[in-house]
């Protein structure tokens, strides 16, 4: 005869009570295991969604890259040719070049028939004070296009006739100048030939006049400080790499930079698309994180609730069991069994109940988790049925819960006065 | 005959609504090895209290209990249980069998206290045979008659070969025949060297005892 046999026989004798205890623990364990499985699936699904989004973004970016390359080939781009000694930092800070080169360079470039350049626009640009209005403006002297191929080619930019000026929108509005108005610039009279539409950049405060008049006003006879080479076409993505050596061979004491071209705008758009794609992934991630937090919060309330209810229920069952077995406890004590042995009998039963409940709860919870479909219509997330670590954890936690819940009733049983019980019976 | 159980001026009181209720008052009693002593008295006269004090289950309010030359109440509670398991056997009117254990397991129940398993099963089978229970070994108490249940209780009480057997109204729930069987068995045990203390309200049981003591209102006259 052993304690285990006694416990086992008693369990068989009071099957219903034992079964109710096991079910209670199973529900608590199943709740915990299922909650963990749901969160695990959620994380896997999140990873899957984000990976798909990233793959899709990469695919779109690759397509954009390809489109970009095609755009470069078809649309061409603009370059600005500057004197070699021009400091680019100064150029970007002042909005105009401070070094000069002969106007003749533009003609030389056009005559060279560089295959990659379609339009050549020499200019003289400087930030000046418009003394008549006490206003700082950008003065741009242009002579129109130096034809590369023939006079019949469609010019990209019209020349400004001497004695006329073209104004940026902001400047015209600010100075209340309209087309046809006559005005003076640095003592010379001009007629407003055109007011450009608003462009949202420095063009809005620019005054365009003919190159020769600009050279006179600025005292830069025969000089220019930039040549815009427009609508350059290259059959490679590395446009500057191709065009620079060509121009260097014709105008050795110059440098070439890319100038606000359509292709740059396209590149910016492409970057914006990439940024938007990243933001979209981030939004998706935040959404999934929020959903996970909601699910975790629900589990954090539900699981302890189930545990508590299960613990209380097991405690009540154990108390009822102790009351049912008062006589048995009395006689076992009379036979010489110690209070400690009585405690072991009740705790052993609780531990067996916990083990059985832990096993069943794990099976039920895991099955629920495996079968749970987080997103209807989406391919299911595969989840292995067995998780040894979790099973071991449950097989430790569940008996512990049952033993803790039964502790007080078991102590009560162990401390019962056998004489009192035997006298009452 | 050497004294095995000595009660020296023992008394026991229980808390009452106003004053303490004295269940046993200054009783001195000796039961020798191999002696069968019967204590007769009406219900509520303190017989069971006396028996529980003798069986190391109920600490007396006053006086001393000496069992086999030792005061068991001076021992720590764990050792008291061991002492009881080794020295004392109990038989009760209500049998107090464990309801979910079969006859053999009920007879073997005292081994839970002593963790003694070697040869004990053979002894349990011998006792079952001696009390005519061989064919009922796999039956649970609910399937037994009252006489059989009391015989199981008796076999259980004797498993650890106690030197003192305490019987509380052992024939109270039995018919004449089974009652006589149990009392004869107790007398045989006494002849074999066991000290037997029996408390009962039935006068005729005393016929088999070596000594019969009358108890009234917590005192032995």
Image (tube, rainbow, N blue to C red):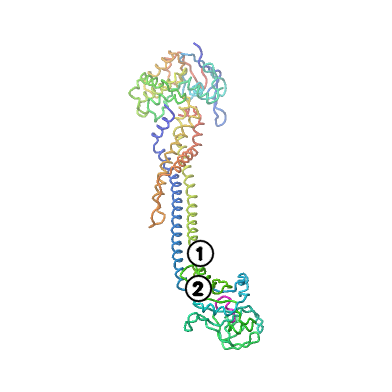
Q: Is residue A242 above or below residue A320?
A: below
Q: Is residue A101 above or below residue A296?
A: below
Mark 1: few, some, or many residues within 10 Å (few <14, many ≥20)? few
Q: Is residue A345 visible?
A: yes
- Viewer-nearest residue: A349 or A418: A349
Left-right relation of A100 to B46: right
| Residue A158 is a magenta residue | no
Range of magenta residues? A198-207
The residue that disc 1 covers is: A275
Report in which chain the residue with disc 2 lies. A
- Report how far apart the C-alphas of labels 1 and 2 lie in the structure: 24 Å
Number of the label disc, if any, that sits on residue B162:
none
The residue that disc 2 covers is: A77
Q: Is residue B50 visible?
A: no
Please tell me if label 1 and label 2 are on a single chain.
yes
Disc 1 or 2, which lies upstream in sequence? 2
Q: Callout 1: helix, strand or loop?
A: helix
Mark 2: few, some, or many residues within 10 Å (few <14, many ≥20)? many
How many labels sit on residues? Answer: 2
- Viewer-nearest residue: A99 or B171: A99
């Amino acid at each position: 005869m052993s304690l285990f046999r006694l416990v086992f026989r008693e369990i068989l004798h009071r099957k219903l009570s034992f079964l109710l205890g096991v079910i209670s623990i199973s529900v608590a364990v199943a709740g915990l295991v299922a909650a963990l499985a749901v969160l695990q699936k959620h994380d896997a699904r999140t990873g899957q969604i984000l990976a798909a989004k990233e793959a899709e973004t990469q695919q779109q970016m690759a397509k954009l890259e390809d489109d970009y390359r095609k755009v470069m080939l078809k649309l061409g781009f603009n370059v600005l040719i500057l004197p070699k000694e021009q400091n680019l930092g100064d150029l970007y800070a002042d909005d105009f070049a401070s070094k000069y080169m002969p106007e003749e360079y533009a003609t030389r470039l056009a005559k060279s028939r560089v295959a990659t350049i379609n339009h050549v626009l020499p200019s003289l640009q400087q930030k000046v004070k418009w003394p008549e209005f006490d206003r700082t403006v950008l003065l741009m002297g242009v002579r129109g296009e130096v034809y590369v191929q023939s006079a019949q080619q469609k010019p990209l930019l019209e020349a400004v006739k001497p004695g006329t000026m073209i104004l940026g929108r902001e400047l015209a509005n600010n100075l209340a100048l309209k087309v046809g108005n006559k005005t003076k610039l640095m003592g010379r009279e001009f007629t407003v030939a055109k007011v450009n539409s608003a462009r949202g950049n420095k063009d809005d405060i620019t005054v365009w006049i003919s190159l020769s008049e600009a050279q006179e006003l600025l005292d830069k006879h025969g000089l220019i400080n930039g040549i815009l080479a427009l609508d350059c076409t290259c059959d490679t993505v590395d446009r500057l790499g191709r065009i620079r050596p060509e121009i260097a061979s014709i105008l050795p004491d110059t440098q070439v930079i890319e100038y606000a071209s359509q292709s740059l705008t396209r590149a910016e758009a492409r970057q914006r698309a990439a940024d938007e794609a990243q933001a979209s992934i981030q939004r998706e991630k935040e959404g999934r994180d929020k959903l996970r937090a909601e699910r975790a919060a629900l589990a954090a309330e539900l699981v302890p609730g189930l545990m508590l209810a299960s613990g209380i229920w097991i405690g009540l069952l154990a108390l009822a069991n102790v009351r049912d077995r008062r006589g048995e406890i009395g006689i076992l004590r009379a036979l010489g069994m110690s209070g400690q042995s009585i405690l072991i009998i009740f705790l052993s039963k609780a531990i067996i109940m916990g083990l059985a409940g832990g096993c069943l709860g794990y099976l039920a919870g895991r099955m629920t988790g495996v079968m749970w479909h987080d997103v209807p219509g989406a391919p299911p997330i595969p989840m292995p049925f067995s998780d040894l670590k979790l099973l071991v954890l449950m097989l430790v936690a569940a008996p512990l819960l049952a033993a803790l819940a039964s502790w007080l009733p078991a102590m009560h049983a162990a401390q019962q006065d056998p004489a009192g019980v035997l006298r009452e019976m | 005959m050497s004294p095995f159980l000595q009660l020296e001026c023992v008394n026991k009181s229980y808390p009452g609504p106003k004053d303490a209720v004295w269940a046993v008052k200054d009783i001195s009693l000796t039961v020798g090895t191999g002696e069968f002593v019967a204590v007769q008295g009406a219900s509520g006269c303190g017989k069971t209290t006396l028996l529980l004090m003798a069986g190391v289950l109920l600490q007396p309010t006053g006086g001393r209990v000496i069992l086999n030359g030792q005061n068991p109440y001076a021992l720590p509670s764990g050792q008291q249980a061991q002492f009881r398991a080794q020295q004392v056997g109990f038989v009760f009117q209500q049998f107090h069998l464990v309801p979910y254990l079969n006859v053999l397991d009920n007879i073997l129940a005292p081994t839970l206290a002593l963790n003694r398993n070697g040869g004990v099963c053979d002894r349990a089978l011998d006792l079952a045979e001696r009390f005519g229970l061989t064919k009922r070994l796999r039956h649970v108490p609910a399937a037994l008659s009252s006489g059989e249940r009391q015989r199981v209780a008796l076999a259980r009480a004797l498993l650890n070969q106690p030197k003192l057997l305490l019987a509380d109204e052992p024939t109270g729930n039995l018919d004449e025949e089974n009652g006589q069987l149990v009392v004869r068995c107790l007398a045989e045990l006494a002849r074999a060297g066991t000290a037997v203390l029996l408390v009962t309200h039935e006068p005729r049981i005393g016929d088999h005892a070596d000594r019969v003591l009358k108890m009234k209102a917590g005192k032995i006259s």
